[in-house]
C-alpha cells in the first residue's frame, strides 16, 4: 500500500510530481474542469497503471493533455484544417477536448485501439505548468474510481484513491466542476459527444454546423458501436438511487412530498429548500454554480446515507445541458418529466 500525500501546488511540489511522472508513476492533478489522474502518455506501463487504479475498462480511451500547440506534433498530423484552427483559437486553452486522427506512436492503450486520439489543452495554471515542466503530453482521465462521480477537490481524489497513488496536487476546488466538452470534427461538421462548459451555442459562434451526439440525452444502444466509448458505462453514481425530475418547482414538490421517507432525500436549487422540513440539499442557483456543485452533492448523498434522491433537473441550455447529461447518467436514465 502506497502512502498518499496531498501536496500544496507550490513550484517545488509541481517539480516533485514531474519526477514521479518521469519515474512512470501516476499523480492526481487539478484542472479547471475536474481533477485528473495523470501519467506519461508515452509510457505504456504508466498508462496501464491508470486503468488498474481506476478499475477502468480497457476499451475506454484516455485524453492527452498538452500545454502548447507544438505538443500536438506528438499526437496528430491533422492540425491544419481551418475548422480545427478556428475552434482551438477561440477555446484553447480551456475545457474543450477535440478528437483527431492519431499519429503512429500514440499507444493503443491510450486510444483503445481507435484510429483517433482525444486532445485537450487545459487552462488551469497548475496543470499547464506541470505539463510544461514534463515536456510531453500527459494522459489524464478524471481521478475517480470508475463509475463514481468525478472529483472536484483534492479530498475527493484522496477518498477514492488513497493507498493507490503517491501524490495529489491540491489546486483547490475546480472552477468549472464538470468534465470538458468532447467534440469530433468531420468535414465542416462539429459533433458534440460529451457536453461541457463550451456549450453548443458557443461552438456555433465559430462553426456553422454543430450537432449533438446521440448519446448526450439517450442511453447507449447496446447494439451500436460507441463513438465516444465512455458513454457505454455507468457513471457518476452515488450509492443512492437517483431520480431526475424535469418539471416546474410546484410539480416537483407535489411529486416528491408523497414519496419522502426515511433516507429519502431531495436536491433542489438554492432558495427552494425552505419548502422541505428535512432531508434536503441544495446545489446552486445559477447554472455555473450548479455545475460546480453537482459532483460534490452526488458524493454528499453517500455521506448522509441516502437510499434514494429526487433531483431537480437544470435547464438544458448552455452549461445546463452538461449538468443534465451527468444527472441522467447518475440516475441510470431514471427520468420523470412532469
Ligand atoms: O475535463 C476533462 O476532460 C477531464 C480532465 C481531467 O481533463 N478528463 C476526463 O477524462 O474527463 P475521462 O477519461 O474521464 O473522459 C474521457 C472521455 C471518455 O468518455 C472517453 O470515452 C472519451 O473521452 N474519449 C477519449 N478518447 C476518445 C476517442 N479517441 N474517441 C472518442 N471518445 C474518446
Ligand atoms: Mg471520467
Image (cartoon, grey):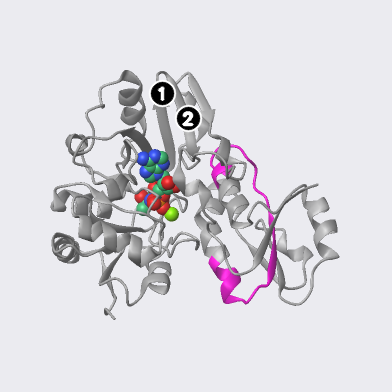
Is disc 1 in contact with disc 2, using a CB cutoff of under 8 Å? yes
Q: Ligand 2 is located in which of the four quadrants? A: bottom left
Residue at (34% x, 39% y) in the render: 114
Q: Which residues are magenta?
A: 299-322
Comparing 227 with 262, the one in front is 227
Let me know if residue 260 is in the magenta part: no
Q: Position of residue 148 (x, y in %)?
A: 50, 63
Q: Image quarter for residue 14?
A: bottom left
* Residue at the disc numbered 2: 191
Residue at (25% x, 63% y) in the render: 26
Left or right: where does residue 195 sit relative to residue 257? left
Q: Secondary structure at mark 1?
A: strand
- Badge 1: residue crowd in 10 Å (few <14, some 14–19, many ≥20): few
Q: Position of residue 315 (x, y in %)?
A: 65, 42
* Residue at the disc numbered 1: 186
Q: Is residue 176 above or below residue 101?
A: below
Q: Secondary structure at mark 2?
A: strand
Q: Position of residue 78 (x, y in %)?
A: 26, 26
Let me know if residue 321 is in the magenta part: yes
Distance from the alpha carbon under mark 1 to that under mark 2: 8 Å
Amino acid at each position: 500500500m502506497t502512502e498518499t500525500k496531498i501536496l500544496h501546488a507550490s513550484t517545488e511540489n509541481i517539480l516533485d510530481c514531474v519526477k514521479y511522472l518521469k519515474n512512470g508513476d501516476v499523480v492526481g492533478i487539478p484542472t479547471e474542469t475536474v481533477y485528473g489522474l495523470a501519467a506519461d502518455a508515452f509510457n505504456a506501463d504508466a498508462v496501464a497503471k491508470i486503468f488498474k487504479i481506476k478499475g477502468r475498462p480497457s476499451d475506454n480511451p484516455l485524453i492527452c493533455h498538452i500545454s502548447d500547440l507544438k505538443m500536438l506534433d506528438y499526437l496528430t498530423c491533422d492540425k491544419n484544417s481551418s475548422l480545427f484552427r478556428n475552434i482551438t483559437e477561440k477555446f484553447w486553452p480551456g475545457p474543450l477536448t477535440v478528437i483527431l486522427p492519431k499519429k503512429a506512436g500514440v499507444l493503443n492503450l491510450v486510444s483503445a485501439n481507435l484510429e483517433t486520439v482525444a486532445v485537450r489543452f487545459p487552462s488551469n495554471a497548475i496543470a499547464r505548468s506541470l505539463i510544461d515542466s514534463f515536456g510531453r503530453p500527459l494522459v489524464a482521465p478524471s481521478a475517480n474510481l470508475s463509475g463514481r462521480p468525478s472529483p472536484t477537490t483534492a479530498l475527493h481524489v484522496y477518498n477514492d484513491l488513497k493507498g493507490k497513488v503517491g501524490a495529489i496536487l491540491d489546486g483547490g476546488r475546480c472552477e468549472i466542476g464538470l468534465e470538458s466538452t468532447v467534440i469530433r470534427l468531420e468535414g465542416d461538421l462539429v459533433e458534440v459527444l460529451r457536453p461541457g462548459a463550451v456549450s453548443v451555442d458557443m461552438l456555433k459562434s465559430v462553426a456553422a454546423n454543430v450537432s449533438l451526439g446521440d448519446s448526450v440525452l439517450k442511453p447507449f444502444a447496446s447494439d451500436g458501436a460507441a463513438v465516444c466509448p465512455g458513454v457505454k458505462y455507468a457513471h457518476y453514481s452515488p450509492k443512492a438511487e437517483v431520480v431526475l425530475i424535469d418539471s416546474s418547482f410546484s410539480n416537483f414538490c407535489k411529486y416528491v412530498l408523497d414519496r419522502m421517507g426515511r433516507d429519502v432525500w431531495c436536491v433542489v436549487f438554492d432558495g427552494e429548500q425552505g419548502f422541505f422540513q428535512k432531508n434536503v440539499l441544495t446545489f446552486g442557483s445559477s447554472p455555473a454554480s450548479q455545475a460546480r456543485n453537482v459532483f460534490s452533492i452526488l458524493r454528499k448523498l453517500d455521506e448522509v446515507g441516502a437510499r434514494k434522491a429526487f433531483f431537480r433537473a437544470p435547464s438544458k441550455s448552455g452549461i445546463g445541458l452538461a449538468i443534465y447529461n451527468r444527472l441522467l447518467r447518475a440516475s441510470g436514465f431514471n427520468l420523470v418529466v412532469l
